[in-house]
Image (tube, rainbow, N blue to C red):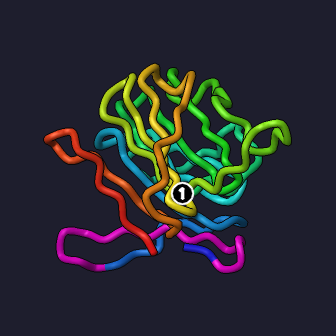
């Protein structure tokens, strides 16, 4: 959660559904995903967090810029995030190093507003965003191709169905 890009809060529920505040941060938190029972990542306003102890503690990663809207783990080492200004970042070593596969602040690149990311495996992934934007990579994010726009509505989330089809939702 967060208010005005600030005051992020992280909550958890137990098996009985009791809600507990786990931690607070100086920046908004937007998305969370666990790669396994111990390792998880949070995307947020200009920041990325990682846990290696099942969520008891969270460590700020060495990633700056963008409002990171979505995070997806293929495994505990391979994680992708997309930012609202069009950034796409990836780690292949569990967050030791983060690579900007696309720098959303580069004025020479087409402007994208990204809100969601999903990966089928280490090679095939999709990103979605405003004005019907869907991007696809087949080489782990080294290159992204833009799908033909079928709508001008904003896509806010996407997932890959077990049959391989892509599902998007939004405005």
Q: Nearer the viewer, residue 158 or 54?
A: 158
Specify the quadrant that holds the N terminus: bottom right
Residue 47 horizontal side relative to residue 142, left or right: right
Residue 83 horizontal side relative to residue 11, left or right: right
Residue 8 is inside the magenta segment = yes
- Could you tell me if residue 39 is visible in this image? no
Q: Position of residue 154 (x, y in %)?
A: 51, 67
Q: Among all residues in the image, which is located at the extreme right?
A: 107
The residue segment tinted magenta is: 3-18
10 relative to 129, above or below: below
Q: Position of residue 24 (x, y in %)?
A: 60, 68
Q: Position of residue 122 (x, y in %)?
A: 38, 24
Specify the quadrant that holds the C terminus: bottom left
Q: Nearer the viewer, residue 148 or 29?
A: 148
Secondary structure at numbered mark 1:
strand
Residue 37 horizontal side relative to residue 137, left or right: left
Q: Among all residues in the image, which is located at the extreme left?
A: 163
* Circle 1 residues within 10 Å: few <14, some 14–19, many ≥20: many
What is the total number of numbered labels drawn onto the structure image? 1
Residue 78 is inside the magenta segment = no
Q: Which residue is mark 1?
A: 129
Residue at x 62%, y 58% (from the top left corner): 44
29 relative to 166, above or below: below
Magenta stretch, main secondary structure, is loop
Residue at x 49%, y 53% (from the top left corner): 149
Kindly indicate the quadrant of the structure image that contains residue 36: top left
Q: Position of residue 39 (x, y in %)?
A: 40, 39
- Could you tell me if residue 102 is visible in this image? yes
């Amino acid at each position: 959660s967060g208010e005005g890009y600030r005051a992020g809060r992280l909550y958890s529920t137990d098996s009985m559904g009791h809600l507990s505040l786990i931690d607070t941060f100086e920046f908004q938190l937007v998305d969370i995903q666990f790669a396994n029972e111990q390792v998880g990542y949070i995307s947020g306003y200009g920041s990325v967090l990682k846990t290696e102890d099942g969520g008891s503690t969270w460590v700020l990663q060495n990633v700056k810029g963008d409002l990171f809207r979505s995070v997806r783990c293929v495994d505990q080492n391979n994680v992708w995030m997309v930012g609202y200004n069009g950034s796409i970042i990836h780690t292949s070593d569990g967050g030791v190093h983060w690579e900007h596969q696309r720098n959303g602040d580069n004025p020479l690149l087409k402007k994208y507003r990204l809100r969601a990311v999903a990966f089928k495996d280490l090679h095939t992934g999709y990103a979605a965003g405003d004005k019907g934007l869907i991007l696809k990579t087949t080489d782990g994010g080294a290159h992204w191709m833009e799908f033909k726009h079928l709508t001008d509505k904003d896509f806010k989330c996407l997932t890959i169905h077990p049959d391989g089809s892509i599902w998007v939702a939004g405005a």
